[in-house]
Image (cartoon, helix red, strand yellow):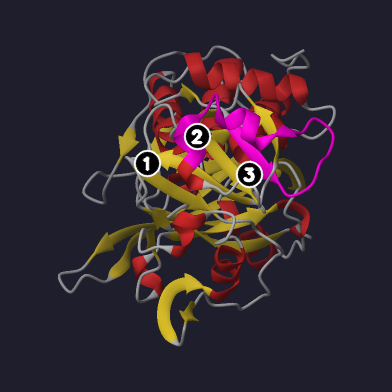
Amino acid sequence: MSGMTGGTQEAGRVWAHVGQAFAEWEYDVVVVGAGRMGTACALFLRRLAPGLRLLLVERGGLPNEEGATILAPGVWTALDVPPGREREAAWVRAALERDFGDVTFQTRALLELHAGEGEGHVPTADLLAHFPEAAGLLDPAALPWTRLDGEAATYRPGAVALACGQGAVRVGADLLLNTHAHLTPGGVRLDRLTVTNTHQIVTHETHELRAGVVVVAMGADGPHAAEHDLGVHTAHGRAYRQTPRLNTASSDRTPLLRAGGLTLRPQHGGFTLIPPIHHRDPHGYLPGGGRLTGVPVGVRRETLEDLIRLMDALPPLATEALEVGHSLADVPGAWLALPGGRTETPPVHQRLTDGVHLLLGGPLADTLGLAVASDLAAQIAGVRERPWE
Protein backbone atom coordinates (compact mmCIF):
# COMPACT_ATOMS: atom_id res chain seq x y z
CA MET A 1 0.00 0.00 0.00
CA SER A 2 1.42 3.37 -1.00
CA GLY A 3 1.65 6.49 1.13
CA MET A 4 2.22 4.90 4.54
CA THR A 5 4.83 7.55 5.39
CA GLY A 6 5.55 11.11 4.47
CA GLY A 7 1.93 12.26 4.69
CA THR A 8 0.65 15.77 5.18
CA GLN A 9 -1.94 17.31 7.45
CA GLU A 10 -3.19 19.70 4.79
CA ALA A 11 -6.97 19.77 4.50
CA GLY A 12 -8.59 17.40 2.05
CA ARG A 13 -10.76 18.30 -0.93
CA VAL A 14 -14.54 18.18 -1.15
CA TRP A 15 -16.56 17.43 -4.28
CA ALA A 16 -20.20 18.23 -3.52
CA HIS A 17 -21.71 18.20 -7.02
CA VAL A 18 -20.93 17.16 -10.59
CA GLY A 19 -19.90 20.68 -11.56
CA GLN A 20 -16.66 20.05 -9.66
CA ALA A 21 -14.37 17.96 -11.84
CA PHE A 22 -13.14 14.71 -10.27
CA ALA A 23 -10.03 13.23 -11.87
CA GLU A 24 -8.62 10.94 -9.16
CA TRP A 25 -7.98 7.30 -10.01
CA GLU A 26 -6.31 5.75 -6.94
CA TYR A 27 -6.46 5.97 -3.15
CA ASP A 28 -4.94 3.92 -0.36
CA VAL A 29 -8.30 3.70 1.45
CA VAL A 30 -11.86 4.37 0.31
CA VAL A 31 -14.59 4.54 2.95
CA VAL A 32 -18.04 4.09 1.45
CA GLY A 33 -20.75 5.68 3.58
CA ALA A 34 -20.66 8.94 5.56
CA GLY A 35 -22.88 8.02 8.50
CA ARG A 36 -21.32 8.13 11.94
CA MET A 37 -19.58 4.75 11.52
CA GLY A 38 -17.93 5.65 8.21
CA THR A 39 -16.99 9.21 9.11
CA ALA A 40 -15.60 8.15 12.49
CA CYS A 41 -13.50 5.42 10.87
CA ALA A 42 -12.18 7.93 8.32
CA LEU A 43 -11.29 10.46 11.03
CA PHE A 44 -9.59 7.93 13.29
CA LEU A 45 -7.66 6.41 10.37
CA ARG A 46 -6.36 9.77 9.15
CA ARG A 47 -5.19 10.53 12.69
CA LEU A 48 -3.47 7.16 13.09
CA ALA A 49 -1.97 6.99 9.58
CA PRO A 50 -1.79 10.50 8.12
CA GLY A 51 0.28 9.24 5.20
CA LEU A 52 -2.62 7.25 3.77
CA ARG A 53 -4.56 8.88 0.94
CA LEU A 54 -8.20 8.44 1.97
CA LEU A 55 -11.46 9.14 0.17
CA LEU A 56 -14.84 9.21 1.93
CA VAL A 57 -17.76 8.59 -0.46
CA GLU A 58 -21.43 9.29 0.27
CA ARG A 59 -24.51 8.79 -1.90
CA GLY A 60 -26.22 11.84 -0.38
CA GLY A 61 -25.07 14.63 1.90
CA LEU A 62 -23.08 14.67 5.12
CA PRO A 63 -24.63 12.71 6.71
CA ASN A 64 -27.18 11.16 4.38
CA GLU A 65 -30.58 12.66 5.13
CA GLU A 66 -32.23 9.28 4.53
CA GLY A 67 -29.79 7.15 6.52
CA ALA A 68 -30.17 5.51 9.91
CA THR A 69 -27.70 7.94 11.54
CA ILE A 70 -30.14 10.85 11.35
CA LEU A 71 -32.89 8.85 13.07
CA ALA A 72 -30.67 6.99 15.55
CA PRO A 73 -31.87 7.35 19.16
CA GLY A 74 -28.71 9.03 20.40
CA VAL A 75 -28.97 7.29 23.78
CA TRP A 76 -25.83 6.12 25.56
CA THR A 77 -26.58 3.80 28.46
CA ALA A 78 -24.56 1.31 30.45
CA LEU A 79 -27.64 -0.93 30.48
CA ASP A 80 -26.95 -1.77 26.81
CA VAL A 81 -23.28 -2.72 27.25
CA PRO A 82 -22.49 -6.44 26.77
CA PRO A 83 -20.25 -8.01 29.42
CA GLY A 84 -16.59 -7.33 28.76
CA ARG A 85 -17.19 -4.19 26.67
CA GLU A 86 -17.44 -1.73 29.56
CA ARG A 87 -14.14 0.04 28.85
CA GLU A 88 -15.03 0.61 25.22
CA ALA A 89 -18.43 1.99 26.15
CA ALA A 90 -16.93 4.34 28.76
CA TRP A 91 -14.45 5.60 26.16
CA VAL A 92 -17.30 6.26 23.72
CA ARG A 93 -19.22 8.23 26.35
CA ALA A 94 -16.19 10.36 27.18
CA ALA A 95 -15.48 10.99 23.49
CA LEU A 96 -19.07 12.05 22.84
CA GLU A 97 -18.92 14.49 25.73
CA ARG A 98 -15.63 16.16 24.82
CA ASP A 99 -14.37 15.45 21.29
CA PHE A 100 -16.98 16.41 18.69
CA GLY A 101 -18.09 19.92 19.55
CA ASP A 102 -21.76 20.66 20.16
CA VAL A 103 -23.62 17.36 19.70
CA THR A 104 -26.18 18.33 22.39
CA PHE A 105 -24.63 15.86 24.80
CA GLN A 106 -26.56 15.76 28.07
CA THR A 107 -26.42 13.41 31.03
CA ARG A 108 -29.98 12.21 31.54
CA ALA A 109 -31.06 9.37 33.83
CA LEU A 110 -32.69 6.34 32.25
CA LEU A 111 -35.44 4.46 34.10
CA GLU A 112 -35.90 0.92 32.79
CA LEU A 113 -39.34 -0.09 34.03
CA HIS A 114 -40.38 -3.67 34.85
CA ALA A 115 -43.46 -5.50 36.03
CA GLY A 116 -41.42 -7.90 38.20
CA GLU A 117 -38.56 -7.70 40.63
CA GLY A 118 -35.03 -8.48 39.47
CA GLU A 119 -31.35 -7.86 40.09
CA GLY A 120 -30.64 -4.18 40.65
CA HIS A 121 -34.33 -3.25 40.65
CA VAL A 122 -35.73 -0.68 43.05
CA PRO A 123 -39.36 0.30 43.65
CA THR A 124 -40.63 2.65 40.95
CA ALA A 125 -42.59 4.68 43.47
CA ASP A 126 -39.39 5.47 45.37
CA LEU A 127 -37.65 6.72 42.22
CA LEU A 128 -40.57 8.92 41.21
CA ALA A 129 -39.86 11.02 44.28
CA HIS A 130 -36.54 11.92 42.62
CA PHE A 131 -37.97 12.20 39.09
CA PRO A 132 -41.37 13.88 39.48
CA GLU A 133 -41.38 14.79 35.77
CA ALA A 134 -41.95 11.10 34.98
CA ALA A 135 -44.93 10.67 37.31
CA GLY A 136 -47.57 11.44 34.68
CA LEU A 137 -45.98 9.21 32.09
CA LEU A 138 -46.39 5.82 33.75
CA ASP A 139 -48.54 3.77 36.06
CA PRO A 140 -46.28 2.58 38.91
CA ALA A 141 -48.79 -0.14 39.78
CA ALA A 142 -48.32 -1.68 36.32
CA LEU A 143 -44.52 -1.20 36.36
CA PRO A 144 -43.60 -1.32 40.06
CA TRP A 145 -39.88 -2.03 39.62
CA THR A 146 -37.15 0.01 37.96
CA ARG A 147 -33.51 -0.43 37.03
CA LEU A 148 -31.77 2.96 37.02
CA ASP A 149 -28.85 4.23 34.95
CA GLY A 150 -28.07 7.62 36.45
CA GLU A 151 -25.20 8.21 34.00
CA ALA A 152 -27.13 7.64 30.77
CA ALA A 153 -26.86 10.42 28.21
CA THR A 154 -28.47 11.75 25.06
CA TYR A 155 -26.81 13.31 22.03
CA ARG A 156 -27.33 13.85 18.28
CA PRO A 157 -25.73 11.12 16.14
CA GLY A 158 -26.17 13.23 13.01
CA ALA A 159 -24.07 15.98 14.60
CA VAL A 160 -21.40 13.39 15.46
CA ALA A 161 -21.28 12.23 11.84
CA LEU A 162 -21.01 15.82 10.62
CA ALA A 163 -18.23 16.60 13.10
CA CYS A 164 -16.31 13.44 12.19
CA GLY A 165 -16.69 14.06 8.46
CA GLN A 166 -15.54 17.66 8.72
CA GLY A 167 -12.74 16.62 11.07
CA ALA A 168 -11.55 13.96 8.62
CA VAL A 169 -11.39 16.55 5.83
CA ARG A 170 -9.47 18.96 8.06
CA VAL A 171 -6.78 16.31 8.62
CA GLY A 172 -6.49 15.40 4.95
CA ALA A 173 -9.30 13.06 3.89
CA ASP A 174 -11.03 13.79 0.58
CA LEU A 175 -14.84 13.79 0.51
CA LEU A 176 -17.01 12.93 -2.50
CA LEU A 177 -20.74 13.55 -2.02
CA ASN A 178 -23.79 12.68 -4.12
CA THR A 179 -22.00 9.63 -5.49
CA HIS A 180 -23.07 5.99 -5.52
CA ALA A 181 -20.21 3.53 -5.06
CA HIS A 182 -20.19 -0.03 -6.41
CA LEU A 183 -17.66 -2.49 -5.01
CA THR A 184 -15.27 -3.93 -7.61
CA PRO A 185 -12.20 -6.19 -7.37
CA GLY A 186 -9.39 -3.92 -6.23
CA GLY A 187 -11.45 -0.78 -5.80
CA VAL A 188 -14.79 0.89 -6.47
CA ARG A 189 -16.82 2.21 -9.39
CA LEU A 190 -18.22 5.66 -8.71
CA ASP A 191 -21.46 6.95 -10.23
CA ARG A 192 -21.67 10.70 -9.69
CA LEU A 193 -25.33 11.62 -9.38
CA THR A 194 -27.26 14.65 -10.48
CA VAL A 195 -30.91 15.70 -10.60
CA THR A 196 -32.74 16.39 -13.86
CA ASN A 197 -35.26 19.19 -14.36
CA THR A 198 -37.98 16.57 -13.79
CA HIS A 199 -36.47 15.74 -10.36
CA GLN A 200 -35.06 12.36 -11.39
CA ILE A 201 -31.74 11.23 -9.94
CA VAL A 202 -29.47 10.06 -12.76
CA THR A 203 -25.82 9.12 -13.23
CA HIS A 204 -23.89 12.06 -14.66
CA GLU A 205 -20.52 10.33 -15.01
CA THR A 206 -18.75 7.17 -13.90
CA HIS A 207 -15.21 6.69 -12.60
CA GLU A 208 -13.19 3.55 -11.91
CA LEU A 209 -11.08 3.95 -8.78
CA ARG A 210 -8.33 1.68 -7.48
CA ALA A 211 -8.05 1.29 -3.71
CA GLY A 212 -5.74 -0.72 -1.47
CA VAL A 213 -8.46 -0.97 1.19
CA VAL A 214 -12.21 -0.42 0.96
CA VAL A 215 -14.34 0.06 4.08
CA VAL A 216 -18.02 -0.65 3.42
CA ALA A 217 -19.89 1.54 5.93
CA MET A 218 -23.20 1.67 4.08
CA GLY A 219 -25.35 0.69 7.03
CA ALA A 220 -28.16 -1.71 6.22
CA ASP A 221 -27.17 -1.62 2.52
CA GLY A 222 -23.66 -2.87 3.24
CA PRO A 223 -24.32 -6.63 3.41
CA HIS A 224 -26.41 -6.45 0.21
CA ALA A 225 -23.61 -4.59 -1.57
CA ALA A 226 -21.13 -7.25 -0.46
CA GLU A 227 -23.31 -10.01 -1.90
CA HIS A 228 -24.41 -8.21 -5.05
CA ASP A 229 -21.09 -6.62 -6.02
CA LEU A 230 -18.55 -9.11 -4.66
CA GLY A 231 -20.54 -12.33 -4.36
CA VAL A 232 -19.76 -12.54 -0.63
CA HIS A 233 -22.62 -13.87 1.47
CA THR A 234 -22.94 -12.67 5.07
CA ALA A 235 -25.26 -13.61 7.94
CA HIS A 236 -26.21 -9.99 8.64
CA GLY A 237 -29.76 -8.71 8.39
CA ARG A 238 -31.75 -5.53 8.55
CA ALA A 239 -34.99 -4.20 9.99
CA TYR A 240 -37.12 -1.15 9.30
CA ARG A 241 -37.46 0.96 12.43
CA GLN A 242 -39.85 3.87 12.79
CA THR A 243 -39.61 6.60 15.42
CA PRO A 244 -43.11 8.00 16.13
CA ARG A 245 -43.63 11.22 18.03
CA LEU A 246 -45.38 11.52 21.41
CA ASN A 247 -46.50 15.10 22.03
CA THR A 248 -46.48 14.91 25.81
CA ALA A 249 -44.47 17.68 27.44
CA SER A 250 -40.85 17.01 28.42
CA SER A 251 -38.01 19.18 29.70
CA ASP A 252 -34.28 18.99 30.33
CA ARG A 253 -35.07 17.34 33.68
CA THR A 254 -37.29 14.59 32.25
CA PRO A 255 -35.57 11.18 32.42
CA LEU A 256 -35.43 8.62 29.66
CA LEU A 257 -37.97 5.85 30.11
CA ARG A 258 -37.80 2.29 28.82
CA ALA A 259 -40.52 -0.32 29.14
CA GLY A 260 -41.05 -3.52 27.20
CA GLY A 261 -38.14 -2.55 24.97
CA LEU A 262 -39.78 0.77 24.05
CA THR A 263 -37.67 3.84 24.85
CA LEU A 264 -39.21 7.27 25.39
CA ARG A 265 -36.53 9.82 24.57
CA PRO A 266 -37.25 13.42 25.65
CA GLN A 267 -36.66 15.60 22.60
CA HIS A 268 -37.86 18.97 21.30
CA GLY A 269 -40.31 19.44 24.18
CA GLY A 270 -41.98 16.06 23.66
CA PHE A 271 -40.79 12.49 23.15
CA THR A 272 -39.34 10.46 20.31
CA LEU A 273 -40.39 6.82 20.65
CA ILE A 274 -37.75 4.19 19.92
CA PRO A 275 -39.60 0.88 19.46
CA PRO A 276 -38.00 -2.49 20.14
CA ILE A 277 -36.75 -4.55 17.20
CA HIS A 278 -37.88 -8.14 17.62
CA HIS A 279 -36.31 -9.78 14.56
CA ARG A 280 -34.83 -9.15 11.14
CA ASP A 281 -37.21 -8.31 8.35
CA PRO A 282 -37.35 -10.97 5.61
CA HIS A 283 -35.66 -10.39 2.27
CA GLY A 284 -37.93 -8.39 0.02
CA TYR A 285 -40.03 -6.95 2.83
CA LEU A 286 -41.52 -3.55 2.03
CA PRO A 287 -42.54 -1.36 5.00
CA GLY A 288 -46.21 -0.60 5.28
CA GLY A 289 -48.53 1.07 7.76
CA GLY A 290 -50.95 -0.82 9.98
CA ARG A 291 -54.53 -0.25 11.05
CA LEU A 292 -55.91 1.12 14.30
CA THR A 293 -59.60 0.31 14.89
CA GLY A 294 -59.85 -0.35 11.17
CA VAL A 295 -58.34 3.00 10.16
CA PRO A 296 -55.06 3.00 8.16
CA VAL A 297 -52.14 4.55 10.05
CA GLY A 298 -48.49 5.19 9.25
CA VAL A 299 -46.99 3.06 12.04
CA ARG A 300 -46.13 -0.46 10.88
CA ARG A 301 -48.24 -3.24 12.36
CA GLU A 302 -45.50 -4.78 14.53
CA THR A 303 -44.69 -1.43 16.16
CA LEU A 304 -48.37 -0.60 16.59
CA GLU A 305 -48.91 -3.85 18.51
CA ASP A 306 -46.04 -2.95 20.87
CA LEU A 307 -47.53 0.48 21.53
CA ILE A 308 -51.01 -0.92 22.16
CA ARG A 309 -49.58 -3.50 24.57
CA LEU A 310 -48.00 -0.73 26.67
CA MET A 311 -50.89 1.74 26.70
CA ASP A 312 -52.12 0.76 30.17
CA ALA A 313 -48.64 1.02 31.69
CA LEU A 314 -47.79 4.23 29.79
CA PRO A 315 -51.13 6.11 29.64
CA PRO A 316 -50.01 8.95 27.26
CA LEU A 317 -49.68 6.33 24.50
CA ALA A 318 -53.46 5.94 24.58
CA THR A 319 -54.10 9.63 23.92
CA GLU A 320 -54.09 11.86 20.87
CA ALA A 321 -50.56 12.87 21.86
CA LEU A 322 -49.33 9.79 19.97
CA GLU A 323 -48.74 10.59 16.30
CA VAL A 324 -49.52 7.51 14.24
CA GLY A 325 -49.98 9.31 10.91
CA HIS A 326 -52.16 8.31 7.97
CA SER A 327 -49.51 6.64 5.82
CA LEU A 328 -45.93 5.40 6.06
CA ALA A 329 -44.64 8.77 4.86
CA ASP A 330 -46.03 10.46 7.98
CA VAL A 331 -43.80 8.56 10.44
CA PRO A 332 -39.98 8.88 10.25
CA GLY A 333 -38.25 5.57 9.64
CA ALA A 334 -35.07 4.04 8.24
CA TRP A 335 -33.48 0.66 7.59
CA LEU A 336 -31.22 -0.46 10.42
CA ALA A 337 -28.42 -3.00 10.08
CA LEU A 338 -28.59 -6.07 12.32
CA PRO A 339 -25.10 -7.52 12.79
CA GLY A 340 -25.34 -11.28 12.62
CA GLY A 341 -29.04 -10.91 11.85
CA ARG A 342 -29.79 -10.44 15.58
CA THR A 343 -31.12 -7.50 17.53
CA GLU A 344 -28.77 -7.72 20.53
CA THR A 345 -25.43 -8.00 18.68
CA PRO A 346 -23.07 -5.04 19.17
CA PRO A 347 -21.49 -3.20 16.22
CA VAL A 348 -18.94 -5.21 14.27
CA HIS A 349 -16.36 -4.98 11.53
CA GLN A 350 -15.67 -7.97 9.32
CA ARG A 351 -13.12 -8.78 6.63
CA LEU A 352 -15.05 -9.68 3.47
CA THR A 353 -12.15 -10.31 1.07
CA ASP A 354 -8.55 -9.14 0.79
CA GLY A 355 -8.63 -5.40 1.31
CA VAL A 356 -12.40 -5.11 1.87
CA HIS A 357 -13.93 -4.62 5.32
CA LEU A 358 -17.59 -4.38 6.31
CA LEU A 359 -18.40 -1.95 9.15
CA LEU A 360 -21.84 -2.21 10.78
CA GLY A 361 -23.46 -0.25 13.60
CA GLY A 362 -26.91 -1.58 14.40
CA PRO A 363 -29.10 -1.28 17.52
CA LEU A 364 -26.17 -0.76 19.93
CA ALA A 365 -24.29 1.78 17.79
CA ASP A 366 -25.18 4.62 20.19
CA THR A 367 -23.14 3.01 22.94
CA LEU A 368 -20.34 1.13 21.12
CA GLY A 369 -20.26 2.30 17.49
CA LEU A 370 -17.35 4.74 17.80
CA ALA A 371 -15.19 2.14 19.54
CA VAL A 372 -15.73 -0.40 16.76
CA ALA A 373 -14.96 2.22 14.11
CA SER A 374 -11.79 3.12 16.02
CA ASP A 375 -10.80 -0.54 16.27
CA LEU A 376 -11.08 -1.04 12.50
CA ALA A 377 -9.11 2.15 11.84
CA ALA A 378 -6.34 0.93 14.13
CA GLN A 379 -6.31 -2.46 12.43
CA ILE A 380 -5.95 -0.90 8.98
CA ALA A 381 -3.25 1.46 10.24
CA GLY A 382 -1.34 -1.39 11.84
CA VAL A 383 -1.64 0.11 15.33
CA ARG A 384 -1.90 -2.37 18.19
CA GLU A 385 -2.91 -0.01 21.01
CA ARG A 386 -6.54 0.91 21.61
CA PRO A 387 -7.48 4.13 23.44
CA TRP A 388 -9.73 2.36 25.97
CA GLU A 389 -6.90 0.05 27.04
Q: Where does residue 260 sit, x and y in percent of width and height?
A: 67, 54
Q: Which residue is tagged 3?
A: 361
> Sequence-wise, which precedes: disc 2 or disc 3?
2
Instruction: Check contact, mark 2 vs mark 1: CB within 8 A.
Output: yes
Q: Residue at 49% across / 52% down in the picture?
A: 273
50 relative to 338 in the view: left or right: left
Q: Which residue is tagged 1?
A: 62
Number of residues whose C-alpha sits closer than 10 Å to that of mark 3, classed few (under 14), some (14–19) or many (20 or more): many
- The secondary structure type at the circle numbered 1 is loop
Residues 87 and 212: in front is: 87
Q: Is residue 110 visible?
A: yes
Q: Where does residue 264 sit, x and y in percent of width and height?
A: 51, 46
> Sequence-wise, which precedes: disc 3 or disc 1?
1
Relative height, residue 133 to residue 237 (above, below): above
Q: Quadrant of the C terminus?
A: top right
Q: Quadrant of residue 92?
A: top right
Amino acid marked by disc 2: Thr
Residues 224 and 66: in front is: 66
- The secondary structure type at the circle numbered 3 is loop
Q: Residue at 73% across / 58% down in the picture?
A: 236
Q: Which residue is tagged 2?
A: 39
Amino acid marked by disc 1: Leu
